[in-house]
Amino acid sequence: MIGLYDLWPAFVVVALLWPLAGLPLFQRVGFEATAARVRAIDGMRGYLALAVALHHAVIYHEFLTTGAWKYPPSAFYGLLGQVGVSFFFIISAYLFWGKLLSARASLDFPTLLLKRAFRIGPLYILAVGVAMALEIVDGRIDYSTFATYERAFFNLLFGVFGYVPLSNARVCVLACVTWTLPYEWLFYFSLPIAAIFSRHPVTRIGLPAVLLAFSILMSMSGGSGAYSYLGLFAGGMLCATLEANALLVRVHRHALSAIALALLVYVFATYRVAYAPGPMLLCIGAFVLIVSGADFFGLLTATRSVRLGEISYGIYLLQGLAFVSIFSIPPVRTFAMDNATQYWLVIVMAMVLLLLMALVAHLVVEKPGVSLGNRLAAILRLSNQRETREVPIASDARSWRMPTSLTRQSADR
């Protein structure tokens, strides 16, 4: 018999999903690359999103049993979600701080935020819209209070404020994953200030180092989890700085993979939570090795891994809706809750559905949204360039005019 918290079913689920990424339908995934990217990072995103989904799959069993949404008693399944989110924060900081470091001129922040909005927003609004529609169908919403409409309004703002259920009696049907998006947006909004420090060789490494040290000190003194998130962003920035200064580890990729894997195994074998200085530093260290060339013996750079990475946002955001869809079928729910073996069989079904949902969302919502954002950004960029060209022309035109006093003197003569 399989236990609910046995480790090996998680690996079996991922292995069973692997062939799906090789189907012809998945050949259409992906965005047009506009810059050099580390392929291993693209490949690891899908596994990070699947790790978060498996974390919530175990939590969902407790939710179906008691109605409580709480951290699982298994250290392994608890860390799956937290380590996955940790690496997502590190990756975001690495990519966007790297943009600042590699920019030859000042970065166009309005364009960057516009493109981010169209990258995150369309699928987010769709998922939140479905979640709120399900709440409306439940009929437990209090329409007489202003707070209900206020929540609905803030829920639709591209994830800047995350998602709050309209009904206090409702557990988030999105598996409560949207809490990370406000931190992502906060990082994006801080980039104009961070850009000031990216222009000098000392401050470009000093800023992330100071932020990381501050995060560790505050975490050790009992500060909130937000300080750990700050440290993860700082760690991603530090990785980008090391890469920009050619300070990465120069060892064969298999050796790097073995060390990175050992660091992750140590995290799962030693800690119960990832949002603490020890596991945070180990995750940052593992990411430095991945940027240096660790590909986990070819797994992260495999085409199927990269395809899963391209739809990772959908896997992350839609997992709650996949669970709701599967477990809302009474016979399936009864079958799943009979024993742990049958529950894991249903989880396989839910994960297959999740992958298909993420694929459709990627092709129908994400890619068109990104294309529209790129077109609008190009229009905005051309408009800004046109205004920049027109200002000097207007100034030059005025400089050829005679001063008013001289004009009057000429007229008097």
Image (tube, grey):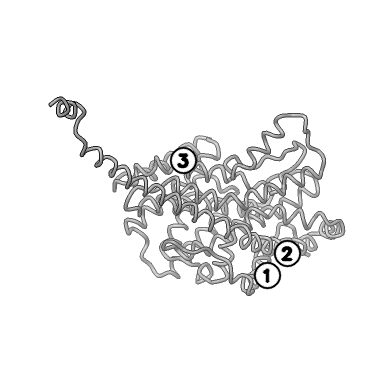
Determine which quarter of the picture holds residue 402: top left
Q: Is residue 404 above or below residue 354?
A: above
- Decide: marks 1, 3 in contact (CB < 8 A)? no
Q: Which mark is residue 348?
A: 2
Say whether residue 183 is left or right of residue 201: right
- Residue type at mark 1 is Leu
Residue 279 seen in this snapshot: no
Residue at x 15% of width, y 25% of height: 412
Q: Nearer the viewer, mark 1 or mark 3?
A: 1
Q: How many marks can you see?
A: 3
- Residue type at mark 2 is Val
Residue 73 rendering spot, x and y as whole percentages: 69, 49
Q: CA distance from mark 1 to mark 3?
A: 39 Å
Name the residue furthest left.
413
Q: Residues within 10 Å of mark 2 (few under 14, many from 20)?
A: some
Q: Nearer the viewer, mark 2 or mark 3?
A: 2
- Residue with the mark numbered 3: 215
Residue 66 rendering spot, x and y as whole percentages: 80, 45
Q: CA distance from mark 1 to mark 2?
A: 8 Å
Say whether residue 34 is left or right of residue 123: left
Residue at x 68% of width, y 52% of height: 56
Pick whichever of labels 1 and 3 is earlier in the sequence.
1
- Residue type at mark 3 is Ser
Q: Nearer the viewer, residue 103 or 386?
A: 386
- Decide: marks 1, 2 in contact (CB < 8 A)? yes
Determine which quarter of the picture holds residue 361: bottom right
Pick whichever of labels 1 and 2 is earlier in the sequence.
1
Residue 44 rendering spot, x and y as whole percentages: 54, 62
- Residue with the mark numbered 1: 16
Q: Which mark is residue 407?
A: none
Q: CA distance from mark 2 to mark 3?
A: 38 Å
Residue 377 rendering spot, x and y as whole percentages: 47, 52
